[in-house]
Image (spheres, coloured by chain):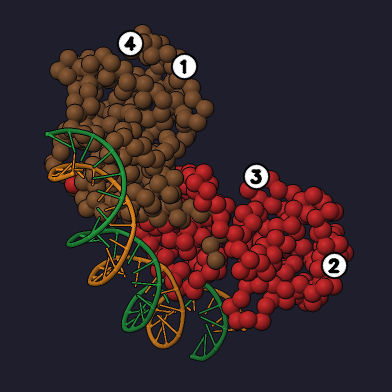
Chain colours: A red, B brown, C green, D orange
Amino acid sequence: MKAGPDISRVAALVGDPARCNMLTALMTGRALTASELAQEAGITPQTASSHLAKLEAGGLIEPEKQGRHRYYRLTDPDVAGVLEGLQGIAARAGHMRVRTGPKDPALRRARICYDHLAGDLGVQMLDSMKRQRLIRQTKQTIELTGDGKRFMAEELQIDADALTHPRRPVCKACLDWSERRHHLAGTLGAALMGRFTELKWAARDTTPGSRVVNFSRNGEKRFAALFGANE
Amino acid sequence: MKAGPDISRVAALVGDPARCNMLTALMTGRALTASELAQEAGITPQTASSHLAKLEAGGLIEPEKQGRHRYYRLTDPDVAGVLEGLQGIAARAGHMRVRTGPKDPALRRARICYDHLAGDLGVQMLDSMKRQRLIRQTKQTIELTGDGKRFMAEELQIDADALTHPRRPVCKACLDWSERRHHLAGTLGAALMGRFTELKWAARDTTPGSRVVNFSRNGEKRFAALFGANE
DNA sequence: TCGATGCTTCGGCTATCGTCGAACAATGAA
DNA sequence: TTCATTGTTCGACGATAGCCGAAGCATCGA
């Protein structure tokens, strides 16, 4: 009947919200593990595994085994191109992001993305660090400047040199789910989140499975002093 | 919990086989009626009506009322672009729709892909143009060489400099459905197809909705003289 | 060797959505 | 008017596919 490539099968892969969240998370160009992607999509690892297998079979993503992790990345810049094209059409049709709505504003403000801070405050922190020249962002990589290392040591007692890891970058830009802008990931992002917790500036919500991060009144003040929007 | 420009909703629209058939049928650029599209998709008019309403709401197609008919067309060349991109990905993944078979050899030989020549002859033309160094293909882009511009002007009276378009490239490689190789798209591809039609070398099949392109005896000879396989 | 972690497979539940029959509305022609 | 054609709405059915709990591999570290 019809000849040609089966577009609909590929489109259907992108058509599922969970898979779509995974794909957009991968649009940074960086590879993410299966669990990270599951968290990004807000689903359990089992479900994610099923989705990832389908995306792989559809040629949209490629796996790379490293130890017991499975890193996935978009197979091709063309895939990202198509996703961008779809974004354009969706935007034009007014299908803009259904703001998670007042349903869970806390999740938009601050949440855990794997092990680091995401949401409005996460994005704000990365912005502020750039503005204060604590980090330098070149093409694809981010690294701490000398000022940045001093800042981490003096203000937050974080030894930047101790953060090197064989397979994980110290700094990494991670596309924010709700904000559509980058926040800081990598071992530094994780270390910062850990320090915030230790200092009792912030704590993960006690609801099991919740990714919300609650800042204390004092914590919010101290955070703003370091990474405030008006720095 | 979905955020982001809602690309999954748009993708899901394309993800249904019936709707996808309608969209590909519209890639000729021609407007088709609701019943024609229903037939093209192999579904009843009731079902088609529902699908068309969804596609319209999603901004993928636009209706135009004429008497008791409703003509639908793709809203935008960008939509066609995304569909082409999906074709490319699907083809790479080997998700071809099986029926390419000997079912319609004419369709495999020459057909319209949106507004340019596709099929065996389309692939052959691009190959020949490369061989004659009329175009230069770098990493991701294709462009006309000086020789190419002269060739277009002298042999086909096409002013290459007049083909620039704000949102569409002059040359673009488009993965061919049946051949699994590239043919020439972009404004140049469209201009060439237009010239072939004007010169009466080729004509679109008169069957409504058909994408077959019929070459005249003379047209085939002239085409072969310019883009023959043994050039 | 033992546990811990990351990921996958399996089975069953549920909800979504595509599908069509039937009836209805709108247009055009006799 | 009356009829034919085109397209839509409504209701119900059924298959597809997403989801998770539980269990099973695989890998790493000790």
Q: Looking at the image, is mark 2 or mark 4 nearer the viewer?
A: 2
Secondary structure state at the residue bearing disc 2:
helix
Label 1 resides on the chain identified as B
Q: Which mark is residue B162?
A: 1
Q: Earlier in the sequence, mark 4 or mark 1?
A: 4
Q: Position of residue B148 (x, y in %)?
A: 40, 16
The quadrant in which the C terminus of chain B is found is top left
Q: Are marks 4 and 3 in contact (CB under 8 Å)?
A: no
Q: Residue at x 39, y 23 (%)?
A: B188
Q: CA distance from mark 4 to mark 3?
A: 45 Å
Judge left or right: residue A72 versus residue A191. Answer: left
* Marks 3 and 2 in Cβ contact (< 8 Å): no
The numbered dot on residue A139 is 3
In what element is the residue under mark 1? helix
Are dots 2 and 4 on a single chain? no
- Depth check, mark 3 against mark 2: the one in front is 2
- Rounded to the nearest angstrom, the CA distance separating label 4 from label 1 is 16 Å
Same chain under badges 3 and 1? The reply is no
Foreground residue among A75 and B106: B106
The residue pinned by badge 4 equals: B155
Q: Which residue is mark 2?
A: A221
Using the rendered image of the protein, determine whether residue B186 is visible from the camera's viewpoint. yes
- Position of the N terminus of chain B, as image quadrant, is bottom right
The image shows residue D19 at horizontal and vertical percentages of 45, 73
In terms of image quadrants, where is residue B119? top left
